[in-house]
Image (spheres, helix red, strand yellow):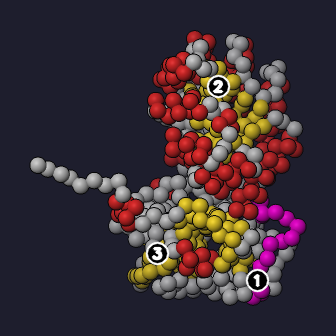
Amino acid sequence: MRTQTQEQEWTAPAGAPQAQHPSRAPAEDATRAAGEIRLRGTMRIGPEGHLWIGGCDTVDLARRFGTPLFVYDEALIRAQIRAFHEAFRETGLAYEIAYAAKAFCTVAMCQLAAEEGLAVDAVSGGELLTALRAGVEPRRIHLHGNNKSQAELELAVRSGIGYIIVDNFVELEMLDAVARDAGVTVDVLLRVAPGVEAHTHEYISTGQQDSKFGFDWENGQAREAIRRLGAHLGLRCIGLHSHIGSQIFDAAGFVTAIERVTELYAEGVALGLPFRVLNVGGGFGIRYTAEDDPEPIRRQIHTIADAVRSAFSASGLPLPEVAVEPGRSIVGEAGTTLYTVGTHKVIPGVRNYVSVDGGMTDNPRLALYGARYEAALANRVNEAPDGVWAVAGKCCESGDMLIWDASLPDPRPGDVLAVFCTGAYNYSMASHYNRNPNPAVVFVRDGEATVVVERETWEDLLRLDRPLRRG
């Protein structure tokens, strides 16, 4: 048997179903197994050698709902959220956790986030409307974005959302005009680019000076924005925001950003601005593969809290409400994508390819920035791998790859391949390249599978098409 449970100190006998450890919720650092397959959350291996999630046989899920299929472990999502709450409560600071909807945005996910006491951070009119349709209290919704449209700003103001994170000088003028036309005062945060480079891929690093996001700290733009706010009578600036990147493994970058942004915070207070919120963004990393080693969420939150206390004490400022925006760290490890194996191709001395019925249309992350994943045959989990396979998608692109080096037993047509940690930025970034429909999404919990997004059909792809008519 090539699997281990998510607990180091407790291991099921070989060949036996692996149950959830009774004394511990599946949270931030619950997957420490040294084996090739790490069981996350409620995952277990059934007596038939199938992968189970949330009390559901994934092979049966693939049969019932088709593949590709996004499967979310609802209990693990809730446990991750509760780990953030617990960490913040330990710090004693006033806080707000806003779910970064860009990671995975559906009505069901926004409902779940609200049930667990989260605000929702949207970055488009579509995400904003999704949160509203999910019944999220408008005052618990924030709006981000470096190029918000007039329509998006009007929707946000009309809906009475909690606050808007202003990204640039043009937006300051646009939003002020929208607020005045509506006859309201809009709460805003200023997004600051603090000049901190997170040690992550350049495409997901956002806090450095050369970034499309935010008012620059180093060249004085952020200070100029704070000074201009007094002239914008439709806006009430209640704090500052920064975000240094994504898939961050330790809190050192947050500490530097907090120190720099606190200087601006003090200047705003001195100018009479009603600051009360310091939003340090998100970007908390997860463990996609055995090589990844993120700090536990509790440790990162405590480091952030200590940095805020230190910086604000040194500046003689009252402590703010500290806000964070986790997305990936809440849903990333809770998502598993199921595929059906199709053809394979062996090039002796070069590479073994196995193709599945999805690909870059449901997971473009490898093509975009070389993301790495672990996988297993869900219907043959107990079988030892006998080779290394490159998992290819079905799109007409050589770069349509999901994993370059998956250790698997010899894959056969009809096998169900499970790719782990696909809960963040997979469904959200799905495309219709080659006119492939988007997969369905199911939440699993206590043996029940709930479809939260229906599978698209070929007909759905044509629904908005119109024929060319001449004469």
Q: Return the disc, 3 or 1, that comes first in the chain's sequence.
A: 1
Residue occupying the far front of the picture = 471
Image quadrant assignment for residue 65: bottom right
- Asked if residue 226 is positioned above or below residue 121 in the image, the reply reads above
Query: Which residue position holds label 2?
Result: 187
Q: Amino acid at mark 1?
A: Pro
Query: Which residue position holds label 3?
Result: 356
Q: Residue at x 60, y 43 (%)?
A: 132
Q: Secondary structure at mark 1?
A: loop
| Cα–Cα span, label 3 and label 1 | 27 Å
Image quadrant assignment for residue 11: bottom right
Q: Return the disc, 2 or 1, that comes first in the chain's sequence.
A: 1
How crowded pointer 1 is (Cα within 10 Å; few <14, some 14-19, many 20+) is rated as some
Image quadrant assignment for residue 408: bottom right
Q: Secondary structure at mark 2?
A: strand
**Contact, mark 3 vs mark 2 (Cβ under 8 Å):** no
Query: Which residue position holds label 1?
Result: 17
Looking at the picture, tell me which residue is in the foreground, 109 or 50. Answer: 109
Which residues fall within the magenta stretch? Answer: 14-30
Q: Which quadrant is the N terminus positioned in?
A: bottom right
State whether residue 48 appears in this view. yes
User: Would you say residue 173 sits in the magenta stretch?
Assistant: no
